[in-house]
Amino acid sequence: MNARAADAKQGWVWQLLVLLAVGSGVLAVVLAHGLAGRAHWSAFLALALALVVTMQACRRTARLCPSNPASQRLADLIVPLLFGAAILVTWEVLCVAFGVPTVLLPAPSLIAARVATSLPTLGADFVQTVIRAAIPGWILGCLAGFAVALLCDRFDFLRRGLMPIGNFISALPIIGIAPILVMWFGFDWQSKAAVVVVMTFFPMLVNTVAGLAAAGHLERDLMRSYGASWLATLVSLRLPAAMPFIFNALKINATLAMIGAIVAEFFGTPVVGMGFRISTEVGRMALDMVWATIAVAAIAGSAFYGLLVLIERKVTFWHPSLRSR
């Protein structure tokens, strides 16, 4: 009962702070739009109030220790949402109040409107860049890196020979190798997938090799005392111990895949794709469409990253970083 009473008391406080933060943020946006082009003190006062209350709400929420797991997950979600909303409100108020030209920086409301009116175009670009290039390249690059890492673990001469080469290739700028791969594989999605494979192969290789070496000596000695083969030791001990490293590579590669596919489209693509859209609309000074494309790419990358995090928590539930939660 005491724990429930404490949770209820803490919940009322942070719920009130969240409501105040949302209300003051909406007030700041309304005042800024009502005084568009004029930096009136009332809009900035409301913005300052929204930011202060948001910081207090985030502090209170971060300190919450609810006994209900669902409430804890909600509290963990509230903090990044509040931070993101504070950034968007600040962006909106400053752009509108100071009358910033859209060719320099459009307000989030204009970007959202552009997304809503350009859904067919953005959807076709999404399919071309993400579905046909980024995801296949990510899958192929991660699988290839994982397979070569197993070979490097089994044959030491491969590890000694490939790891320095991997570090060298990882340092190559993507803007240098992208046009070469476009010339090799053509201007369609295959060349973009090839760029993604190159970008994702070596992070997976390096992380998997490090993860396979993370198993403790006592555990390895125990497996040897049981007469376990290399394959049995790999499946029963070393691969589970390497899972945090493997998921780390998968998450890193999720962002690299988006970057690689978009950058590769700058060097030749059919008349569709996020990279094509960005380069074309920049030349036309349509910065709202550029930001709309960036927003779609950011949302897609964040959703992909979040999905991997959820899978990681299910697979590596035994890890100390997750057990502490």
Image (cartoon, rainbow, N blue to C red):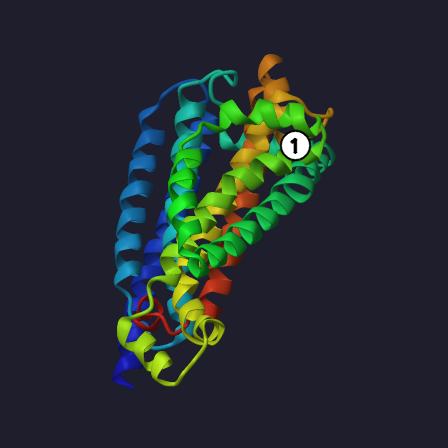
Q: Which residue is mark 1?
A: 191
Q: Which residue occupies the foreground of this view, 74 or 197?
A: 197
Residue 311 % position (x, y): 51, 64
Res 74 visible: no
Q: Is residue 183 above or below residue 312?
A: above
Q: Residue furthest front?
A: 157
Residue 221 spot, x, y in % from top left = 30, 78
* Callout 1 crowding tier (Cα within 10 Å): few <14, some 14–19, many ≥20: many
Q: Is residue 245 above or below residue 302?
A: below
Q: Name the spot of residue 216 as percent of width and height, x first.
A: 29, 70
Front one among 184 and 295 = 184
In this image, 222 relative to 31: left or right? left
**Which residue is rendered at x = 56% and y = 27% of the image?**
178
Relative horizontal placement of residue 45, taking residue 308 as reference (left or right): left
Classify 169 as above or below 211: above
Indicate whether 324 appears above or below 63.
below
Q: Residue at x 35, y 62 (%)?
A: 213
Who is closer to the viewer here, 233 or 190?
233
Q: Quadrant of the C terminus?
A: bottom left
Q: How many marks?
A: 1
From the image, which quarter does the N terminus lie in?
A: bottom left
User: Residue sitting at 27 percent across and 44 percent down?
Assistant: 52
Q: Is residue 21 left or right of residue 103?
A: left
The residue that appears at 35% across and 68% down in the rendered structure is 322
Residue 205 visible in rendering: yes
Q: Position of residue 211 (x, y in %)?
A: 38, 60
- The answer to which of 170 and 165 lies nearer the viewer is 165
Q: Secondary structure at mark 1?
A: helix
Mark 1 belongs to which amino acid? Ser
